[in-house]
Image (spheres, coloured by chain):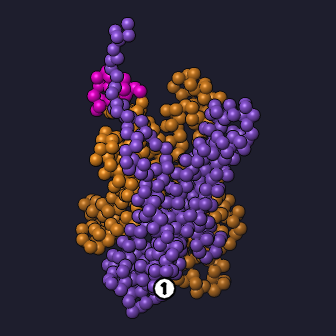
Amino acid sequence: MISKRHLEVLMHKILFLFGSVFVLSVLVFYVSRLAPGDPLVSYYGERAEKMSPEEREWAENKLGLNDSIHVQYIRWLQNAFQGDFGISYKYKMDVTEVIGGRIGNTLILGGIGFVLIFVLALALGILCAWQEDKLADRVICRIGTITSCIPEFWLSLAGILIFATALRWLPSSGAYSIGKENSLADRVWHLILPLSVVVLSHLWYYAYMIRNRLLEEVRAEYVLLARMKGLCRRQVLFGHCLRNAMPAYFSLMALSVPHVLGGTYIVETVFSYPGIGTLTYESARYQDYNLLMLLSLLTGMIVISCNMLAQAVSERIDPRLRMDDRRNYEEVDRI
Amino acid sequence: MRDGFRVVGIRQTTEPPVSVSGSRRQGKPVVSVLVLLLLAVGCLTCDVFVQRNPSYLDLAHSCVAPNREFVFGTDTMGRDIFSMIWYGGRISLGIGLVSTFIATAMAVVLGAVSGCASRRMDGVIMRAVDILLSVPSLLVVILLQAVLGKAGVLSMSLVIGMTGWMSMSKVIRTEVRQIKNSGYVTASRCMGGGFFHILWHHLAPDFLSSVMFMVIMSVRTAIVSESTLSFMGIGLPVEIISWGSMLSLAEQALAGRAWWMILIPGIFLVTTLVCLTNLGNCLRRRVTARHSNL
């Protein structure tokens, strides 16, 4: 049942989301324009360097770059409210189109990576907790610590070096071979290396978290009681401990979305994978303002909403975490 | 009467042996600390045992595979990788330490202020931190770098330090809040303990262990950031030798199949990171001190 208070909390959250996106947009807008660099180079390429002052002025006028930043920002805001985010200087298309063409690739890489991390980390964590301090646990912990320490970009490089350059098993860059855009097998073949890097570099962090959570859990008194009642280890671990650990894991996974996304961006850049990570890097380096703006807002929105989701999940589990103590008591009373 | 009772259902557990030889070292990362020390000493004293100038471009011997003369080979610009590793290590480790110092200082100040402030103030600070966390750090790095001028060792540490304090300050704030509301602080205050007395005798010992863990992890993150940024071409330029900027020649190395140019700096980098992680993990509070009930 949705009560008035729930609605209030929801409104509060939505307001916060919009507020942060607004602040973020101001920050990114001013920061990107104050940073040195010539946006005309990204629009006109090499020609921009040979332009006469009059031509430059004309070009800047055309792109609306010679007004003061405040004017530019207000104009951008007005257009954005009508769904017009401007054109990309490099691709000379609507930024929404540019991003629309690329975001699918990132969602595939990041999405599959995220699901794999989620499932594999859980499996590994349970395995380690089950085998606590036995050989399997120790070996996995050692290997896991090492893999989680390798920076993504170097893991990608080593992967390319071994599997693409030396063994020639897998392609070293891109999302598909030229002329085979629609072949699923070809796409999967290109996805193997980047996907393994994304999964490997994040997997252990989360597996270790769930392992430690479970180890804490099996030291609780209720486990002793359950064992005394005659339940076997498997029943206790899966039926009781895992159940208690899962909610925290969900909240952790919500928090992990931005991390995995950031990792995906780096991996994309190394593999020249046509996703929004490569696009963000390009647009930030070459002053493609409008593109950069929308990409930052998109990333920021994902990060903020995931944080809010994580907070909501952990508040549901443990109402003591609520910021406002007074409301907290009401909540507890009602439950 | 006493003979009539018998204890049933007791769980026989053997006490973990305390003073078995070698147990003092158990769980302590001796190897990691030794390796780290070795690396640090090697980087600091490399003037003594490194004969070649790391930035000398020996174009006659460019891209030579490891052999007796060039132990780790040379890169595409003809520089000796063995000497670059040690001189570059100075910069990589130095940036890690300096930026951690900056990040920790900022995190401790803001986290402590936020933890002790009124609820409204605390909310404002934490929301601001949330927003800062959601700005793509790549963008912040490019801007800060632009403001600070040409990328150098100091500006790089400053940039990494200034982008790395947010999550640490959140942890410190939570820690301060938790401790501040706990019974023993109230008790100490009731007995007339002043602010600094409480801070020094009660708060600091309690959150030092978690802060130490965060600090070690922050050194790790800073080294990773430096190498990633330099690799992508927005950090240190190729002339300033660090483990990251050595890897920025990776594209040419891949084209020339020069595996040593990628693997050797990477192995040094990863070894350092693994040792730091082991050290950090041992500082963390132990969960497995008690016996498992399972």
Percent x, y of residue B188:
69, 34
User: Majority secondary structure of the magenta segment?
Assistant: helix
Percent x, y of residue A271:
38, 67
Kind of element beneath mark 1: loop
Relative depth, front residue between B18 and B78? B18
Q: What shade does chain B have?
A: purple
Q: Amino acid at mark 1?
A: Asn
Q: What shade does chain A have?
A: orange
Percent x, y of residue B42:
47, 72
Relative to A82, residue A243 above or below: above
Percent x, y of residue A204:
38, 51
Residue at 65% x, 63% y: name it. Answer: A30
Asked whether the viewer can see residue B142, the reply is no
Residue B8 lies in the magenta-colored region: no
Residue at 46% x, 64% y: name it. Answer: B36
**What residue is disc 1 on?**
B53
Chain containing mark 1:
B
Relative to B190, residue B212 above or below: below
Residue at 73% x, 31% y: name it. Answer: B191
Relative depth, front residue between B229 and B189? B189
- Estimate how packed mark 1 is, as few (under 14), some (14 to 19) or many (20 or more) residues with alpha carbons within 10 Å: some
Residue A231 lies in the magenta-colored region: yes
- Magenta region, residue range: A221-236
Residue most toward the top? Answer: B1
